[in-house]
Image: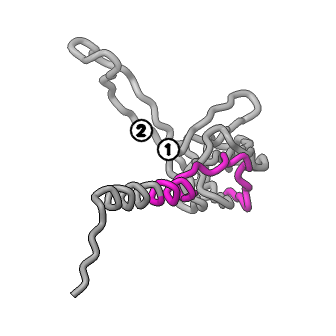
Amino acid sequence: MLTQRFSPYVHIRLLIGALLLGFALAACDNSNSSAPPDTTPPVVVSSTLSTPTTVPLARVLAITTDEPTTISISVSDGTTTWTHNFTDVGTTHSLPILGLLPSTSYTVTPTATDTATPGNSTQGSALPTTTAALPADFPVITGNVVGQTGVAPGVMRSEEHTSELQ
């Protein structure tokens, strides 16, 4: 039987060669490289306002975007403007708009913000809407603040009175 003997340095050279080959292959792997930043703003594919049948002084904004976004809205009655940021992330959103007054015209303007690159946003089209007047038989509600002694700051104790319209 023939036996071949290697010098101990051959084993070390093979080990070093294998390590160098491993490092070279790892350096060629692009899976850990960072992708270029997303500079394309989201596209608002569609946006509509609807009126819930049971809540006539509210609206629902349905908005669809081409990539995951958060939505903020600006609501204006021509005198006062308020904004609200919705933090849910998605490509389809159904968002309630509350606090509207009767017989008032509003403009709702949505803004879609890219979640991959915050600040990368697109403003959607302004959507006009007008609320209807309250029904003639809607009760008038009045309130009186009473006895504030012992009540925590920011809390009001009140009595509520309802009167029928004549």
Give the secondary structure at mark 1.
Answer: loop
| 19 displayed left or right of 122 | left
Q: Residue 43, labelled with which disc? A: none
Front residue of this view, candidates 8 and 109 = 8
Quarter of the picture holding the C terminus: top right
| 56 displayed left or right of 162 | right
Q: Residue 139, labelled with which disc? A: 1
Residue 85 drawn above or below residue 69: above
Work out whether residue 166 can be spotted.
no
Q: Is 103 part of what is drawn in magenta?
A: no
Residue 42: horizontal and vertical position, in percent?
70, 52
Residue at the limit of the structure toward the bottom, as seen here = 1
**Residue denoted by label 2:** 162
Residue drawn at (21%, 87%), measured in percent from left and top? Answer: 1
Front residue of this view, candidates 155 and 97 = 97
* Three-letter code for the amino acid on which mark 1 is drawn: Pro
Residue drawn at (54%, 53%), measured in percent from left and top? Answer: 27
Q: Is 25 part of what is drawn in magenta?
A: yes
Point out the stretch of residues depicted in magenta. Answer: 21-49
Give the secondary structure at mark 2.
Answer: strand
Residue 100 drawn above or below residue 2: above
Q: Dividing the picture into quarters, in which one does residue 101 lie?
A: top right
Residue at the limit of the structure toward the top, as seen here = 149
Residue 130: horizontal and vertical position, in percent?
72, 48
Residue 85 drawn above or below residue 10: above
Q: Dividing the picture into quarters, in which one does residue 105 lie?
A: top right
Residue 164: horizontal and vertical position, in percent?
48, 43
Comes first in the chain, label 1 or label 2: 1
